[in-house]
Image: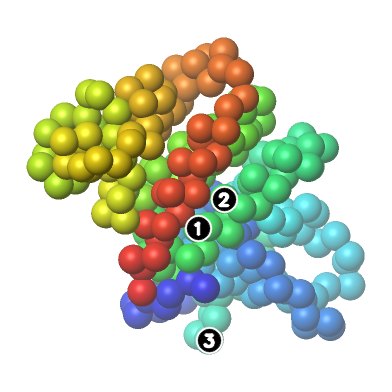
Amino acid sequence: MISSFEKDKLTQGHYSQVGTVLQRRDSSGEGQSLLLFLRDMGPVWVSAPASKTKCRFGGATEPLVWAEFTLYQSPSRLYLQGAEIREDFISLRSSAEKLKTALRIYKRLTGVLLTGHESNNILTLLWSAMVLLKENCPVEIVEYRFTWRLLKEIGLAPSLGYCVKCGSKLECGAVWTKDGLVCPSCSGPAQEDICSEDLSNLRLAAMLSHDRFIGWSKGREKSSLFTVQLKKLLTFFNDID
């Protein structure tokens, strides 16, 4: 669940902002409650009242859709008044693998974002991940990249370059611990979990710019490396209360 964040209400009036639908709750006869993730506003709950016009907002209230949303803050709540779709990422719905990955990414955000708290860097990160999926980059690498970068934004990402124990540069492979990666000297008799070549690929996947990542990732064969390392990364979300 998304944690609540205490802040003053928006001043009564009209607002317009670009973002995406994180969650949707339907209520028979009462319309919908939408969790929108908006630029400069962060995640906000918005009421979309029922209308006699079946498609009042078109497909803009579907999860994964990005739009410019027109809102009205009343004395009691925030209402959706209109929406202009900017990108529906409809092509992702034709691939079960891409769609499941996108939905996992959206769900992962709901556990770390604070409602009413501006998170523009994370919104940009989400947009980038969606575009990478649309560009047919390998889904396992995209999800790994997104997850490490999300952890970095919230201050929990394990270093991929330095030993968490002694601080030395990781050059000859590394071993996973609950605190992060350690160098062979600090790992004792344990065998390395990640060889130096794989560690280099993990760094590239996480740190290449958006445009360079597209070319690099498409030139790679599918590998279990990123699926295995993603499972390791997910344990770092356990530190969130």
With 107 as the anchor, is 96 left or right in this view? right
User: Residue at the spot x=21%, y=36% of the render?
Assistant: 183
Residue 115, image x, y percentages: 44, 70
Residue sitting nearer the eye, 96 or 161 = 161
Residue 70, image x, y percentages: 60, 59
Kindly identify which residue carries mark 1. 109
Q: Which disc, if any, is residue 226? A: none
Q: How far is disc 3 from disc 1 in space, using C-alphas?
A: 27 Å
Residue sitting nearer the eye, 62 or 81 = 62
Question: In the picture, residue 58 is in which quadrant?
Answer: bottom right
User: Residue at the spot x=45%, y=54% of the render?
Assistant: 234
With 143 as the anchor, is 91 left or right in this view? right
Label 1 element class? helix
Kindly identify which residue carries mark 2. 105
Label 2 element class? helix
**Residue type at numbered disc 2:** Ile
* Mark 3 neighbour class, 10 Å CA radius: few under 14, some 14 to 19, many 20 or more: few
**Residue type at numbered disc 3:** Ser
**Residue type at numbered disc 1:** Leu
From where the camera sits, is residue 41 visible? no
Label 3 element class? loop
From where the camera sits, is residue 183 visible? yes
Q: Label 2 near label 3: C-beta < 8 Å? A: no
With 185 as the anchor, is 92 left or right in this view? right
User: Residue at the spot x=55%, y=81% of the render?
Assistant: 77
What is the quadrant of the C terminus in the image? bottom left
Kindly identify which residue carries mark 3. 76
* Number of the front mark, 3 or 2: 2
Question: In the picture, residue 4 is in which quadrant?
Answer: bottom left
